Amino acid sequence: MQMKYTEEKLNTFSKETLIQLFLTQQEQLSEIDGKLQLVLEQLAVMNQNRFGRKTEQMPVPEQLAFTDVDGELVLFNEAEVLAALDEREKETTVKKRPVKKKGKREEDLSGIPVVKVEHYLTEKELEDLFGKAGWKQLPDEIYKRYRFIPAKVEVEEHHVGVYASKEGDTMKKAPHPACLLRGSLVSPSLEAAVLNGKYINAVPFARLEKEFGRYGLAITRQNMANWTIECADRYLAVFYDYLHKYIYKSPVIHADETHVLVRKDGREAGSKSYMWVYRTGEKEKKAVILYEYQKTRKADHPERFLKDYKGICVTDGYQVYHKLGEEKEGLTIAGCWAHARRRYDEVVKALPSKSRKSSIAWQALEQIQMIYHVDNTLKELKPEERKKRRQSSVKPLVEAYFAWVKEKKADG
């Protein structure tokens, strides 16, 4: 508890005591000011992360409205919002008549079946208008419109011929496609529609159930969940294992993990789970991205996934990866520049605008930007030439950056 001094009490102190008291108070105020500045910077970073514009995102309009559908918030006035954004963009853009690409409509319509719909007057109607033989046929006026036909559900009833010899026990069935899941009504086309709806269009099973119901298809969300899990285990797991081995061929891979919230998995609601992501390097002709869901962030998961990998793995500063690189022969862990740069960027955004460009964080960003710029000029070179040029032009910049960091660290 801090002591309170009265004027009478202070008058009894000696000059040396008053000086010491003043210096102590000054030191305490400086410490409080430092802590307050840190809190303000943290608040600025939090506000930027929550409300600030991201590189690939538009600011959220104020008129967004959501409604609850099957326990999920759904944007229901999307059309109005997009229209408003379009109008706003038109207002801030110089009005210039867009140049239409010649043949664009024909190109869009090519390959789509055409159904001719005729609209003609009868002979009697023409005679009433023009008199007998008082008219002639001109070239038709043609309008084109898209016609959308909703999905159609049918039941495939497979009749498989079964034959047996009149003498002996020989029996033969006619060739026929195997069932996707034995004893189930699901077909490859139906499961493909379920996967497309759920994982491409991000439609929850609950809404897919209602959508299929409108087509007269009585399947539940439990049906779809079970089909998807069984098909994944039976057919996709083999493909996943193949890609897992294929990714080992890449001399450089990237790894990262992010937490996800899972409602029901036997733990308390809101428990953190993790999605681990691995992908091939940028220069690979065929990009492979593998997702691995785990309940924890333990080292066991990347250790098992990278068990037989020999090469460079680019990650963030999570120590699990770096410890694995020290223990496993043939595996090199490389730091990700984007993650390193992000901390400087957060610091800059937390500072007042007038003092940003004079900060150490800004100087760091400029140096990293120069590394990015020079490296990007080498993108199109062949691997060996690119490596050679990187050693001569990028390496000195990287070494200069780390020398600068050590110098600043030594200065405190």
Image (tube, rainbow, N blue to C red):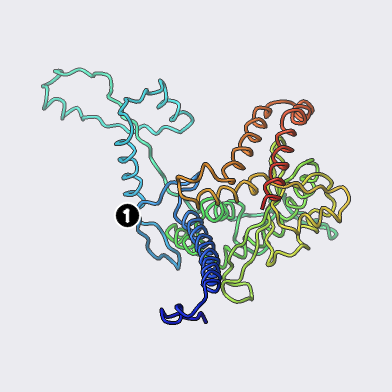
Give the residue at the far right of this rendering: 329
Residue 7 % position (x, y): 41, 78
Residue at image point 52% right, 41% down: 357
**Image x and y of residue 234, in percent:** 72, 58
Residue that numbered label 1 is attached to: 63
The answer to whether 137 appears left or right of 406 in the picture is: left
**Towards the viewer: 262 or 369:** 369
Residue closest to the eye, 71 or 370: 370
To which quarter of the image does residue 363 belong? top right
Q: Residue at x 34, y 44 (%)?
A: 85
Residue kind at label 1, given as amino acid type: Gln
- Compared with 265, 398 (above or below) is above
| Of the pair 409 and 83, the residue shown nearer to us | 409
Is residue 201 placed above or below 301 in the rendered structure? Answer: above
Question: Residue at position x 15%, y 30% from top?
Answer: 125
Tell me the residue at 19%/27% (across/down). 123
- Examine the rendered structure and indicate whether residue 376 appears above or below residue 310: above
Q: Residues within 10 Å of mark 1 (few under 14, many from 20)?
A: few
